Image (cartoon, helix red, strand yellow):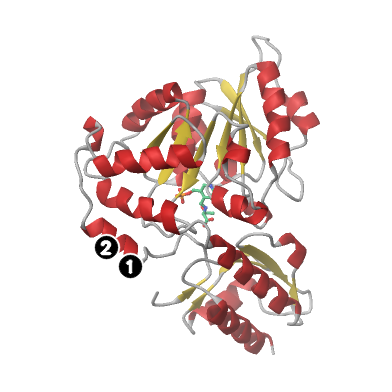
Amino acid sequence: MDKIDFRSDTVSWPTPTMRQAMATAVVGDDVYGEDPTVNELERLAAAKVGMEAALFVASGTMGNLVAILSHAGRGDEAIVGEDAHTYKWEAGGMAALGGVVPHPLPTDYAGRMALADIRAAICEDDPHLPRSRLILLENSYGERGGYPIPPDYFAGVRAIAAQHGLAVHLDGARLFNTAVALNLPASNITQHVDSVSFCLSKGLCAPVGSLLCGSADFIYRARRVRKQLGGGMRQAGILAAAGIVALQEMIERLADDHAHAQQLAQGLTQIPGFRIDPAQVKTNIVFFDLADEVTQSAAEIAHALSAQNIWLGAVGPRRFRAVTHYWVGELQVEQLLSALQRLLA
Ligand code: TLP
């Protein structure tokens, strides 16, 4: 990459192998179901999460929106973490485009809504109330430093959902970071949900796209919703080819990103002026804060870094987010730490 970019793993570029696969991809019209490379990617994706079928969509946001609109209708309610990506960072799509009412609940240090809160949030059948229809989960949990939530929580939520006839959708944008961090197959988690979307264009480095996975019947309905949203793509095999490389070659190496995030967290503990809890860093996202005595703001520090072509997210007046990925390794973490040390000296 031409810069040292820690703002997100979404900034990662496709690898040379991906570019090669894209250049030689066999394509067809995917709206006709005739793109062999998309079909192969969808088969591979469904197998990775132990589900019947998958649908290639343009983004993580689209995967979640297509899922929500396929599970729920106007006036239905979705129970969701108050800092979940589907609630906070997707432009209110579920309400704006689907008439689905979010019911936000607090989450703990790992990003879990309490099971008792979920039970209490489910509406009884009453014409005054929205119909509870869906529970939205996320793993890893972005706003908790990519915390990898173990499968038992999903089993607990699933039991409640089953009792009340609700569906469960998992925003697994970084599902494979969780699987690698917990050393489990992703299907140990996804066996407890009705649908899951995961991203190719984050730590897995593909340029574009996410997969929505679920039962064959669910994906049949989701395909229609994707079309309604304008997401039926034609010779999308060009993109899917990179996605196949992502799933075949880029999952296991996520452990390197986690090690680099830990390297960064440990390094930050050595610089007076930063506040960080390395124990909270379990995958590839590092949140850290400025100590009270530092007079500069996070935005000022991020701006000064950018002058050195090092990019970091200032996500609050005193708060930063750094995300590790394929293109920022041990050396780049050292460069970031040295630059931060100089700026605070
Ligand atoms: N997250 C982005 C920003 O929107 C915050 C990032 O840089 O982390 N679910 C989760 C948990 C995500 O973190 C993201 C992207 C998405 C869904 C949406 O994916 P895209 O960007 O492909 O729509």
Left or right of 165 on screen, residue 67: left
Q: Is mark 1 within 8 Å of ligand 1?
A: no
The answer to which image quadrant residue 80 occupies is top right
Q: Is residue 169 above or below residue 254?
A: above
Q: Secondary structure at mark 1?
A: helix
Label 1, on which residue? 16
Q: 142 or 185, which is in the foreground?
A: 185
Give the amino acid type for the residue marked by disc 2 in the picture: Gln
Label 2, on which residue? 20
Give the amino acid type for the residue marked by disc 1 in the picture: Pro
At 67% across and 40% down in the image, what residue appears?
81
Q: Is residue 235 visible?
A: yes
Rounded to the nearest angstrom, the CA distance separating label 1 from label 2 is 6 Å
Q: Secondary structure at mark 2?
A: helix
Counting every numbered tag in the picture gives 2
Tell me if label 1 and label 2 are in contact, CB under 8 Å. Answer: yes
Q: Residues within 10 Å of mark 1 (few under 14, many from 20)?
A: few
Q: Is residue 237 above or below residue 299?
A: above
Quadrant location of the C terminus in the rendered image: bottom right
At 65% across and 74% down in the image, what residue appears?
264
Q: Is residue 96 visible?
A: no
The answer to which image quadrant residue 120 occupies is top right
Left or right of 37 on screen, residue 306: right
Q: 136 or 148, which is in the foreground?
A: 148
At 63% across and 82% down in the image, what residue appears?
337
**Percent position of residue 248, x then y:** 42, 53
The answer to which image quadrant residue 232 occupies is top left
**Percent position of residue 272, x then y:** 76, 82
